[in-house]
Amino acid sequence: MEVNQKPSLATTAAVLALTIIPAAWAQNSEELTPEQLTPHNVSLTAATYNGRKAVRVMGTPDAQNGDSYAVVKGTSLREGTIEAELAGKPAAGAGGGARGFIGIAFRLQGEKYEYIYLRPTNGRADDQVRRNHSTQYGSYPDFDYARLRREAPEKYESYVDLQPGVWTKIKIEVEGRAARLYVNGAEQPCLIVNDLKMEPREGSVALWVGPGTEGYFSDVKVNPGTQVSSTDASAQIYFDRGHGEFPPPEAMTEIGNRLGHTVKTAEGPITPESLQGSRLVYLRAPNRTFTESEKAAIVGFVKNGGSLLLVLDEEQRQSLAKTGVNDLIAPFGMKLSGDTPHIPNTGAVAKAGEINRQDREVPYDGGREVLGGTPFAYQLDTKGHLAQPYAAYAKFDNGARVVVLAEGMASLFLGDKDAVRLHVDTAAPDNTKWWGKDSAMFMQEVLAWLIAG
């Protein structure tokens, strides 16, 4: 970001044609359409640039600096590579400080992200200082180019040969707190960042344009470090039905189609052999006893790098003592409490972070508390404040991940955008509209995070 004021009438535009391999799954190469992008202070239209089919991304005139980008739907990258061919140049009517700013944002959650971008007009400038500012790393919103240049001159910028409006191939490698930028197929990076400003986390990939830019993107590829395809056994979910669980909700199939998950419904005993070929064991509201051998098989599965999702509702529906599910999660530092005080239709909120890209509103009506692990969702109290943890996670160096939900409504994809929190239809309880409109996105992000471990 180069200026501190909003862009004026000068446009911020990008045109792209994409091939996407999303994080935690892969899909066949296909041309991206405007419908596959989520605009953030931009408009999206189909277009053609230099003979390539594309999508035009135009920044809104009143967008704040650094706040114009298009999120590529279905991407969730923590580590891996992002490749693209792009071309940027100052738009007609842009101010004298326009450089054709164009690049990639990654690990985007909420409105925070890391990003690397180019200043194409600097690549062959007569001023050597400008040439030295051809590439740039930043972290929005706390570490823009001005702060980084002031606090660590030259550390987060570098020279590379660029031309405005000319197709340029880039590759960004992301690993832990490090990122490297390669330009035009070079074997060596032209920019190395060893101290990314945010903690490593899953997040979306977005196509980023700065003020006064006319930009073009083509052949964008997102390749996660851990890539799972729909034909890969590691994307398989073992959905247990051997302990009184209902069948998987239909919405799980829809999520599976989007994420490349396959659901194996199993009604027999859980054994090490039955879990082979699965990435995730999903125990959704069991109400029968797990045998000691089944407990050992599930714990061993996680200790060998598998993931576990456990959902348990209040005592009248699933008995904690009868099922023995605390024995499944105790080895991982987690425990479910008894029933918490019942507040009808109180709702819960999952906070943006490791699992959820944005705050998510989910239904909650009578459940438990998750003790231990890292809380990421909370029951609300009567005043709408965050109360006890409703959901928590744990993750381990071997790739294993565990999520525990202490109430089952979100896992049934309930919740209505028109519902009123704390309201129950006492005359016809079955007609109650449950508060918590984000169950589907919440569950999709939970499943994607568990599969990606």
Image (cartoon, rainbow, N blue to C red):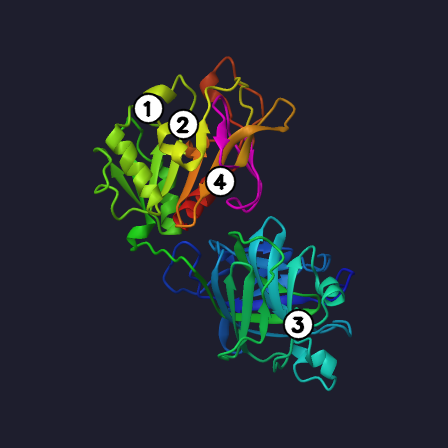
Say which amino acid is labelled 2.
Leu
Could you say which disc has been placed on residue 401 in the image? none
Question: How many C-alpha atoms fall within 10 Å of the one at disc 3: few (<14), some, or many (≥20)?
Answer: many
In percent of the image, x 64 and y 79: which residue is there? 159
Q: Which sits in the foreground, 78 or 70?
A: 78
Q: Is residue 227 above or below residue 248?
A: below
Q: Nearer the viewer, mark 2 or mark 1?
A: 1
If you read the primary sequence from the N terminus, does the residue marked by circle 3 or circle 2 appear first?
A: 3
Residue named by callout 3: 157
Residue 338: in magenta span: no
Q: Secondary structure at mark 2?
A: loop
Q: Quadrant of residue 413?
A: top left
Q: With respect to residue 388, does 142 lie above or below?
A: below
As for residue 372 lying within the magenta part, the answer is yes
Q: In the displayed image of the protein, which residue is found farthest to the top?
A: 427
**283 or 420, nearer to the observer:** 283
Type of amino acid at the residue the image marks with label 4: Phe
Residue 60: x, y in percent? 68, 59
Verify CB contact (< 8 Å) between mark 2 and mark 1. Answer: yes
To which residue does mark 2 refer?
312
Q: Nearer the viewer, residue 274 or 83?
A: 274
Q: Residue at x 42, y 34 (%)?
A: 411
Q: Position of residue 275 (x, y in %)?
A: 26, 42
Query: Which residue is tagged 1?
Result: 323
User: Mark 1, residues whose alpha carbon is within 10 Å: few (<14), some, or many (≥20)?
Assistant: some
Amino acid, disc 1: Thr
Query: Which region shows up in magenta?
Result: 348-374
Instruction: Pick whichever of labels 4 and 3 is earlier in the sequence.
Output: 3
